[in-house]
């Protein structure tokens, strides 16, 4: 079924595809051996298949943030002024931060006390939107320069490291250092997984990128830009990564065999996203956008459905996956309460002893996506048929 809309289908296809892939990583966290405690990119313990299962999901957050910026630009094309767009970005940003610290946090822990506060991608997008709400008033070329400055230059700050729970340290954790903060003698935990400096730069560039999709822009010219930017990002990634001088907190190194050396080359840093991490993920994504434009088949139609309701899909899929995780514990003879993640349970590490083989993770992943697709389709149609409801723009 074709849905008539002014939305740009190729962007929705890419967004939908990364949302589906994202679910794989989250299912792995709640089903695979070691659960949330195992790092699939640790070359000392991983396997190539496990590494790939994690690596392919690296595309999700950068694309999500980048396209959030693009969507902001396109949304602004329908507004009378930048002031209206600025107000929308500011209020939506606040809303996303609130949702992250309540609804999303609850989905990860199932602890109604919300004693573990996880600052992840929705929080980052919300805060970036608040910043962008002020920056959109700057000249376009200055915005591009600022975006590139943040992405190209933030790794120069890698050597600045804070410790402790004082306010200055917490501010730095939020800006540029992944960290865990323990409060109230272990009764509360803050997990800063998405320091926002590079994410701000990425959203700014995504916003500027929106010009390629504004009404009347020549399609062939857009495809040329996508080709040049995509290939340029990939080539720059290969050169900088090979030189091993700048652009990532963890240089690649020769491993026990050529295959693991290859994995080391692509094992870039996500928290915070390094320059090389962003080049590695955004480059191919731009080429995907170029290749998928104008293509209509069952795959693209399915991805469009999810890509048009990404926030709805994101919230629902986390709760569904957590329920599957609890069912998995019961199958193993473990109390379901072990996935009610309070600080005490989280720090106990009991779940490191349990979990399923990776093929089970893939089966559950497929089941989750199949289960959510019709729900997303119904919600997509509801949004389409109720454009007069202003609050739907926040969901």
Image (spheres, rainbow, N blue to C red):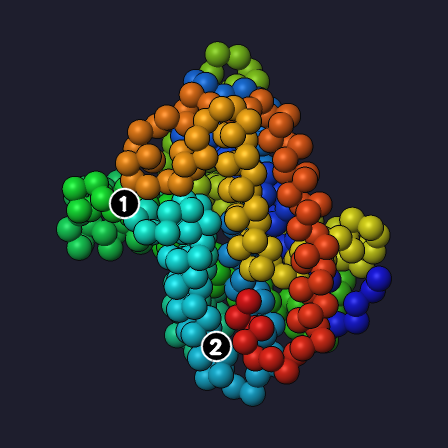
In the rendered image, which residue does mark 2 sit on?
88
* Residue 110 x %, y %: 42, 46
* Residue 157 x %, y %: 29, 46
* Residue 154 x %, y %: 36, 50
* Residue drawn where x is 59% and y is 25% of the image: 358
* Pointer 2 local density, CA inside 10 Å: few below 14, some 14–19, many at least 20: many
The CA distance from mark 1 to mark 2 is: 31 Å
Secondary element at tag 2: helix
Instruction: Count the labels in the image.
Output: 2
Question: Which mark sits nearer the N-terminus, 1 or 2?
Answer: 2
Secondary element at tag 1: strand
Q: Which circle, 1 or 2, is nearer the viewer?
A: 1
Where is the C terminus found, in terms of image quarters? bottom right
Q: Is residue 227 visible?
A: no
Instruction: Report the side of 366 relative to 80 (left or right).
Output: right
Position of residue 394 relative to residue 20, above or below, is: below
Position of residue 94 relative to residue 349, above or below, is: below
* Residue drawn where x is 53% and y is 70% of the image: 394
Position of residue 263 relative to residue 192, above or below, is: above
* Residue 363 x %, y %: 67, 32
* Pointer 1 local density, CA inside 10 Å: few below 14, some 14–19, many at least 20: many
Instruction: Report the side of 385 relative to 262 (left or right).
Output: right
Q: In the displayed image of the protein, which residue is found farthest to the bottom?
A: 80
Q: Is residue 30 visible?
A: yes
Closer to the camera, 298 or 253?
Answer: 298
In the rendered image, which residue does mark 1 sit on?
189
* Residue drawn where x is 46% and y is 84% of the image: 83
Instruction: Report the side of 71 relative to 167 (left or right).
Output: right
* Residue drawn where x is 43% and y is 68% of the image: 95
Closer to the camera, 315 or 340?
Answer: 340
Tell me the tag on residue 80.
none
Position of residue 236 relative to residue 290, above or below, is: above
């Amino acid at each position: 079924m074709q849905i008539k809309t002014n939305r740009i289908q190729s962007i929705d296809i890419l967004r939908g595809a990364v949302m589906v892939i994202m679910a794989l990583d989250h299912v792995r966290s709640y089903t695979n051996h070691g659960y949330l405690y195992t790092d699939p990119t640790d070359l000392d313990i991983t396997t190539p298949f496990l590494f790939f299962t994690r690596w392919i999901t690296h595309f999700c957050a950068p694309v999500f943030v980048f396209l959030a910026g693009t969507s902001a630009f396109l949304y602004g094309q329908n507004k009378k002024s930048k002031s209206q767009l600025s107000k929308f970005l500011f209020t939506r940003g606040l809303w996303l931060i609130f949702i992250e610290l309540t609804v999303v946090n609850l989905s990860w822990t199932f602890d109604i006390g919300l004693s573990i506060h996880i600052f992840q991608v929705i929080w980052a997008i919300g805060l970036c939107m608040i910043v962008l709400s002020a920056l959109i008033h700057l000249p376009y070329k200055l915005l591009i320069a600022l975006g590139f400055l943040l992405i190209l230059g933030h790794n120069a700050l890698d050597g600045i490291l804070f410790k402790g729970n004082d306010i200055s340290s917490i501010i730095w954790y939020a800006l540029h250092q992944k960290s865990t903060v323990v409060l109230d003698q272990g009764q509360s935990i803050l997990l800063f997984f998405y320091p926002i400096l590079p994410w701000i730069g990425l959203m700014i560039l995504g916003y500027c990128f929106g010009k390629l999709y504004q009404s009347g822009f020549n399609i062939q010219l857009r495809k040329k830009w996508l080709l040049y930017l995509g290939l340029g990002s990939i080539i720059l990634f290969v050169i900088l990564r090979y030189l091993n001088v700048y652009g990532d907190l963890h240089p690649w190194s020769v491993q026990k065999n050529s295959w693991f050396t290859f994995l080391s080359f692509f094992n870039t840093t996500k928290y915070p996203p390094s320059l090389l991490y962003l080049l590695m993920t955004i480059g191919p994504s731009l080429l995907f956008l170029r290749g998928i434009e104008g293509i209509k088949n069952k795959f693209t139609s399915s991805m469009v459905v999810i890509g048009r309701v990404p926030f709805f899909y994101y919230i629902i899929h986390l709760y569904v996956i957590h329920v599957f995780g609890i069912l998995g514990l019961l199958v193993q003879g473990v109390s379901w309460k072990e996935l009610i993640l309070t600080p005490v349970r989280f720090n106990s590490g009991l779940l490191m002893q349990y979990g399923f083989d990776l093929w089970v993770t893939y089966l559950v992943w497929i089941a989750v996506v199949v289960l959510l697709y019709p729900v997303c389709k119904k919600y997509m149609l509801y949004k389409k048929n109720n454009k007069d409801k202003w609050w739907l723009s926040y969901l």
